[in-house]
Amino acid sequence: MGRKSKNKQDIPLPVEIEKNTGKTTAALRNTLKHIENNKAKIRQLNQKNKLAKKNSIPPPENISQKSPVSENKKKNIPASKRKASDPPADSSPSSPPTSTKKPKSNSDSKPKHEGWDDPSIESEDQQDSTIDSEDFSDEDSDSDESHHSDDSDNTAPQPSSGKSEKDFLFDLDSESENFPENSALGFDDEDDINLADEFDSDDDIADNDSYDYNSSDDEADNTIEGMERKSKQLLEIDSLIESDSKKELSEATLNMPAVDGTELFFLPTPEELALESEGLKDIKTVQMRVQEVVNVLNNFSRLKNPINSRSEYISQLKSDLEFVYGYNSFLINKLFDIFTISELLEFLEANETPRPITIRVNTLKAKRKQVAQALIKRGVNLDVVAGKWSKVGLTIYESPVPIGATPEYMSGLYMIQSASSFLPVLAMNPLPNERILDMSAAPGGKSTYIAALMQNTGIVFVNDANKDRTRALVANIHRLGVTNSVVSNYDGREFPKVMGGFDRVLLDAPCSGTGVISKDPSVKTNKSETDMGLLTHLQKELILSAIDSVTSNPGENSGVIIYSTCSVTVDENESVVNYALKKRPNVKLVSTGLDFGKDGFTSFCGNHFHPSLSLTKRFYPHTNNMDGFFVAKFQKLSKKSISSSKQSS
Ligand SMILES: C[S@@+](CC[C@H](N)C(=O)[O-])C[C@H]1O[C@@H](n2cnc3c(N)ncnc32)[C@H](O)[C@@H]1O
């Protein structure tokens, strides 16, 4: 992972550069140094060649095409786009050697990282090249100068000694043929290394390449084959220089300071990522990287680096979050769309710790105070549910006895139920003597609450498509003393054909469970795009059935449909509700009456929902310390109000 340090430059930069682009100077300095090392080696060979060679044999025309130098010039590659190994456009045998410390023209750019298109960086590059030419004096300048004249144009070079551009290809001659036998670059003797710091600009690559165009080793080397071979070697050297330079540039940038001098963070290199993908991934390192990347993304204009784009940081963050928290990329992407980065981290963290256990006192059998006292006597540490929004909830902090096996539990004085699952029932506001449907009811936490609020009057149809789950439903109904319920086992989509005319319907829909990950961590990985598609399709069908099951001529306070999920995804919530609004113009959204939680999205990822979606509510583990939940409340319009609204429009 890339760490960073303060800029240790000892050469004062012009104020503008320090302020705006000083961050790249260290990188460029290192890159230049590297290039100069290589150039020094090339130059040394040329000098050896010069001594050894007397004759000049002009090369055949076609061979020049293979030179990277002439290739770039032919293509007229702008300086700012050239690679580290490319010579500047004005580099030619007639260019002045940088050892003269002559300020370079703007076109005389340093090697640049591809994609650095920030103008501020470019200007720094230019500045830096001047600094570097002072930094790294060229003791060979005399000999070099004899081959150059001042050249500020960007056109094809004109050799001062009357040789054509093609001639510049033949400067390494016989010694260059020995490269492969030595080190990676073909140079390994110590003298070469000592020469490394003597050159001052990448112009010299071209200069050196073209240096000894007169030389020839022997006749064989002046054949087309020999020249081609040499050309090939040049290309290989160029490519080695380029790859090494890029690597060094990337390493050097790790030491760059931010604009304001604070430390910069850089993403891992491809090599580091490759190691990680082979299993060498350390959780602590990745956790630290998550923090660093979040910090950069939250202060991007200040802490951005010139190498990586915002989307690269984000994709690294996503992959790191998947690793640290164990999510699949499908879900991480979904969550990224919902939350800001900081909020996402809070959400993911909250999912790592269980929510407090809550119980709902069954008011059909007891009062909250009685249950609280009975449990306290058993050593249970509890309190009323925070926020005063519930009169029946107790939060259990600690219990020396299993809270699902106390005599109070067995006798139906309470139900173990997450605080968030009280909410749809409160929003529904069931009244005594009503006719109510709980379309997907098992195991019955909400339906038994509905029955309690109705004081066991009226009738509650409790339905679930899963027969096995209806057993738990029946057991809870018995335990809690519910006597106004009928249990059924239909696919909810069969309503209202099975029966209709309800005052209120609850659709606590089957969902992905992304709000209850702390209870069921398998949710982190068990859903794919396809699963989500199938699920939302079912949810849409069920909500239309729920709407259609409500009486078509409701009273002013009835005709209510509650849609809820224990998921936080927009696909399962706002999108489903918006779909229902479109498909059923006889319903509207009304306030849930819940005065906390976040308003639902009215637009999301470029999609615009009906503005009334703001009346829906979202609840999150990290903000409400309860399971993630979504609640929407529809009201069916009476025939009368539909016809009057038609008339007015
Ligand atoms: C979130 S759970 C309901 C929890 C319940 N409301 C409670 O408070 O205890 C969703 C339920 O929907 C049921 N279900 C799934 N598909 C269904 C369908 N097509 N029709 C009716 N119920 C369905 C599942 O069996 C599951 O019990």
Image (tube, rainbow, N blue to C red):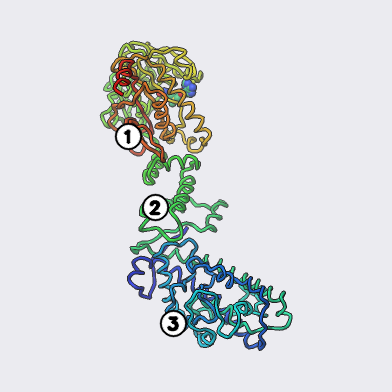
Q: Disc 3 vs disc 2: which is toward the camera?
A: 3
**Nearer to me, 557 or 387:** 557
Name the one closer to the observer, 645 or 336: 645
In three-dimensional space, the C-alpha distance between marks 1 and 3, rounded to whole angstroms, equals 65 Å
Give, as a three-letter code, the residue at label 2: Leu
Other-residue count near label 3 (Cα within 10 Å), few / some / many at <14 / 14–19 / ≥20 = some
Query: Which label sits on residue 599?
Result: 1
Disc 1 versus disc 2: distance between alpha carbons? 26 Å
Residue at 32% across / 34% down in the picture? 599
| Place of residue 206 in the rendered image (x, y in percent of width and height, measured from the top left) | 55, 76
Q: Residue at x 36, y 22 (%)?
A: 587
Within the image, what quadrant is residue 546 found in?
top left
Between 166 and 422, which is closer to the camera in this rendering?
A: 166
For disc 2, the marked residue is 297
Residue where numbered disc 3 is placed: 101
- Residue at 43% in and 70% down: 125
Q: Amino acid at mark 3?
A: Lys
Split into 4 quadrants, where in the image is the C terminus? top left
Identified by mark 1, the residue type is Asp
How many neighbours does mark 1 have within 10 angstroms: few (below 14), some (14-19), or many (20 or more)? some
